[in-house]
Amino acid sequence: MLEVRNLRVAYGGINAVKGIDLDVREGEMVALIGANGAGKTTTLKALTGLVHVSGGHVHYRGRPITRRPPFELVRQGLALVPEGRGVFGRLTVAENLSLGAYFRDEPGEVRADLARTLELFPRLAERRAQLAGTLSGGEQQMLAIGRSLMSRPRLLLLDEPSMGLAPIMVQRIFETILRVAREGVTVLLVEQNAKLALEASDRGYVMESGLITLSDSAENLLTNEKVRQAYLGE
């Protein structure tokens, strides 16, 4: 579904991503782990057209998408849940969710998807008329994921969904991500909680200083001595 070859991103004189290769097959959940500053968020932004790509190419579902504008990629089924959630604080929960379907011209199906999303996130259903800026961090993360699902993504990119959340909320968020994956959405997950990410995923990549240094099945990465020492705290 996603093929990345020799992807490079530079900010001024700083090479944030230094020529990485990465693949995500349809139906997989793939984790991208690494320390702060490794280039993970920049990679997701490059894949979704939010930062300029200085080299390499990206193919999505067999078509080149390098340097395509973000709105075009969303229409093609490529959606990003950004780090920091990015909800519209002065709009209600329902209005935020509706914005996820801004380009869809199927009112009946959009209403059905809204009901489906609220069923997936009962906390949002309870707060659908509440301003998004008044939600807790976990509820805002649910809203950011729900908003992306309203675009009917084929490939969902998640950037640090557990950041800043209480353990019980992290558990709920990951249960929902797994449910979404089981229902057929392909997932590329960037997550600092490496153990949680790998336990949920089929395969994983380790990123260090702008480079992919290791890739393997999630099961093998969980038992890899280097990964255990560097990212699992063991």
Image (spheres, grey):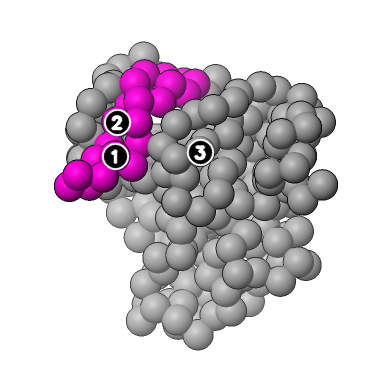
Mark 3–mark 2 distance (CA, rounded to whole Å): 14 Å
| Boundaries of the magenta span | 1-23
Identify which residue is drawn at 48% across, 34% down: 155
Q: Nearer the viewer, residue 92 or 133?
A: 133
Depicted 85 relative to depicted 34: above or below: below
Frontmost of labels 2 and 1 is 1
Mark 1–mark 3 distance (CA, rounded to whole Å): 12 Å
83 in magenta: no
Q: Are marks 2 and 1 in contact (CB under 8 Å)?
A: yes
- Report helix, strand or loop for mark 3: strand
Q: How many marks?
A: 3
Q: Nearer the viewer, residue 72 or 30?
A: 30
Q: Nearer the viewer, residue 106 or 103?
A: 103
Q: For the stretch drawn in magenta, what is the main secondary structure? A: strand
Whether residue 71 is visible: no
User: What residue type is disc 2 on?
Assistant: Arg
- Report helix, strand or loop for mark 2: strand
Identify which residue is drawn at 52% across, 36% down: 207
Asked which quadrant contains residue 178, the reply is top right
Is 191 positioned to the left or the right of 71 in the image? right
Q: Are marks 3 and 2 in contact (CB under 8 Å)?
A: no
Residue wearing tag 1: 15
22 in magenta: yes
Asked which quadrant contains residue 202, the reply is top right
Residue wearing tag 2: 8
Residue wearing tag 3: 208
Mark 2–mark 1 distance (CA, rounded to whole Å): 8 Å
At which x and y percent is residue 180? Answer: 63, 42
**Reading the chain from its start, which is encountered first: label 3 or label 2?**
2
User: What residue type is disc 1 on?
Assistant: Asn
Whether residue 205 is visible: yes
